């Protein structure tokens, strides 16, 4: 089995040295455009996979690509000591392969398969860690190019969604299995701004082969507007998201949930300063209870770009509402919808609900390809009358058995090496010091986490 995996891996590394002038891959692979290779006369086998003309004029073509990721994770006291094995090491593997067909300027079809495995897990793996093989994306675009660099596109089918900073809607890159939606979208682009209106059903991952069928348990819809180059503010996002879940569970009950989210984001990333400020309010109904929840996030940093190693100092803080009182007619627990899985690092211990956190960070560009990052997180419960939740809003511990607010402290550092556009290496070390609340409601042991990631994109 090892030979089957390693030999193609090495062959790709050798051949990629001949692939020049290929732009960096995007997080949403369907946003990559290789039509420029039509004018490239220095063709090799790799460029042919990215642009394979099917018509004489070259406007009809196929493009292929993929992603291979190996990730080793090791825990001591996983889940603060709740897991049955004290020292647990395992390997997560993920394979993605896609084909992108373009027929002129008006028609396009994108198809992507995903296969992910969890090897060495003591406990049975969750569908987020293991999904043996499934149709991850399959959608069709009908595009209408307009004057003055404008375009209108209708997109229908299974697809990944990503909006803004990925605090609410993400591809879930950190965990082993990325998430997708069965959706219909209307996308409008214009120089300086873009708009997106959609209706979708969340695709719930299952572990077997081609069993992620069409489901109606979770409906998700909304609109997202991005305006760039605004004086003083630089970039502004405005959005609305609607969520309906047939079965939702919070510390104050379980049942159907209808939730509306209205928010805005102001952001910029310049040579020295970067900032990302986001706030939103949620309202709706949860089994007869009135929803009233909110969050505010401030993430800023300053980079000493003209100094050796270009050090950057950053600070991030979040206030995320929790339920104020048990057994009343209101629910103030914030729902982060479909956020990135590793919200506070790859270790993915806590999710953004009923939470206050302060997160200072320090990073260095050791070279053009080598990066070091160190950060420190302090966590508290926002409300004593609510529990703590995972990144997917799953309850970890109820708040009914402790009045303590302090959850813990998390220290992390990462080392990233990016030798070229195709390869990515990452090593991460995390130590979580459990505090009063975790010690009241469970074993409350400190967690040690180590991870090593190797990723190849093509």
Image (spheres, rainbow, N blue to C red):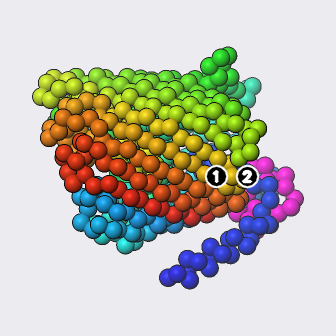
Q: Is residue 185 left or right of residue 17?
A: left
The reply to whether the magenta stretch includes residue 45 is yes
The reply to whether the magenta stretch includes residue 217 is no
Query: What residue span does the magenta drawing correspond to?
Result: 33-51
Q: Dot 1: few (<14), some (14–19), or many (≥20) neighbours within 10 Å?
A: some
For mark 1, give the secondary structure: strand
Asked whether the beta carbons under mark 2 and mark 1 sit within 8 Å of each other, the answer is: no
Q: Marks 2 and 1, how far apart in space?
A: 8 Å
Residue 368, label in figure: 2
Q: Dot 2: few (<14), some (14–19), or many (≥20) neighbours within 10 Å?
A: few
Residue 54 appearing in the image: no
Residue 307 coordinates in the image, percent (x, y): 74, 40
For mark 2, give the secondary structure: loop
- Give the quadrant of the C terminus: bottom right
Residue 339 coordinates in the image, percent (x, y): 42, 41
Question: Is 380 located above or below residue 418 in the figure?
Answer: above
Q: Residue at x 66, y 75 (%)?
A: 10
Q: Is residue 121 left or right of residue 178?
A: left
The number of callouts visible is 2
Quarter residue 317 falls in: top left
Quarter residue 116 falls in: bottom left
Question: Is 26 located above or below residue 147 in the figure?
Answer: below
Identify residue for label 1. Answer: 371
């Amino acid at each position: 089995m090892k030979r089957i995996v390693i030999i193609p891996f090495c062959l790709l590394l050798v051949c990629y040295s001949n692939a020049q002038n290929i732009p960096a891959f995007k997080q949403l692979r369907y946003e990559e455009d290789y039509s420029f290779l039509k004018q490239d006369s220095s063709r090799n086998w790799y460029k042919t996979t990215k642009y394979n003309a099917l018509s004489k004029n070259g406007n009809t073509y196929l493009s292929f690509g993929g992603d291979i990721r190996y990730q080793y994770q090791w825990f001591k006291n996983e889940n603060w000591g709740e897991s049955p094995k004290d020292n647990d090491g395992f390997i997560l593997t993920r394979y993605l392969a896609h084909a992108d067909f373009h027929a002129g300027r008006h028609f396009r079809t994108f198809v992507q398969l995903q296969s992910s495995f969890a090897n060495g897990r003591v406990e049975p793996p969750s569908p987020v860690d293991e999904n043996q093989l499934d149709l991850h994306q399959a959608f069709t675009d009908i595009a209408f190019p307009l004057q003055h660099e404008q375009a209108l596109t209708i997109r229908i089918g299974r697809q990944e969604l990503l909006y803004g900073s990925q605090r609410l809607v993400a591809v879930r890159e950190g965990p082993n299995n990325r998430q997708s939606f069965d959706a219909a979208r209307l996308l409008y682009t214009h120089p300086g701004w873009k708009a997106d209106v959609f209706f979708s059903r969340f695709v719930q991952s299952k572990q077997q082969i081609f069993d992620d069928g069409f489901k109606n348990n979770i409906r998700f819809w909304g609109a997202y507007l991005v305006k760039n180059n605004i004086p003083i503010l630089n970039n502004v996002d405005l959005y609305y998201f609607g969520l309906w879940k047939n079965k939702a569970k919070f510390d104050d009950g379980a049942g159907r949930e209808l939730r509306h989210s209205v928010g805005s984001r102001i952001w910029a990333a310049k040579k020295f300063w970067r900032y990302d400020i986001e706030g939103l309010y949620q309202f709706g109904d949860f089994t007869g209870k009135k929803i009233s929840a909110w969050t505010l996030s401030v993430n800023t940093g300053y980079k000493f770009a003209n100094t050796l190693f270009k050090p950057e100092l950053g600070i991030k803080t979040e206030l995320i509402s929790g339920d104020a009182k048990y057994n009343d007619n209101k629910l103030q627990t914030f729902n982060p919808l479909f956020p990135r899985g590793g919200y506070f690092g790859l270790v993915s211990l806590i999710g953004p609900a009923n939470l206050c956190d302060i997160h200072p960070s320090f990073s260095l560009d050791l070279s053009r390809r080598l990066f070091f990052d160190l950060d420190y997180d302090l966590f508290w419960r926002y409300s004593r009358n609510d529990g703590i939740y995972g990144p997917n809003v799953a309850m970890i511990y109820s708040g009914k058995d402790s009045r303590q607010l302090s959850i813990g402290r998390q220290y992390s550092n990462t080392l990233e090496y990016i030798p070229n556009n195709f390869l990515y290496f990452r090593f991460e070390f995390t130590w979580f010091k459990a505090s009063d609340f975790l010690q009241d409601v469970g074993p409350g042991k400190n967690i040690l986490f180590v991870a090593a990631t190797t990723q190849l994109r093509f």
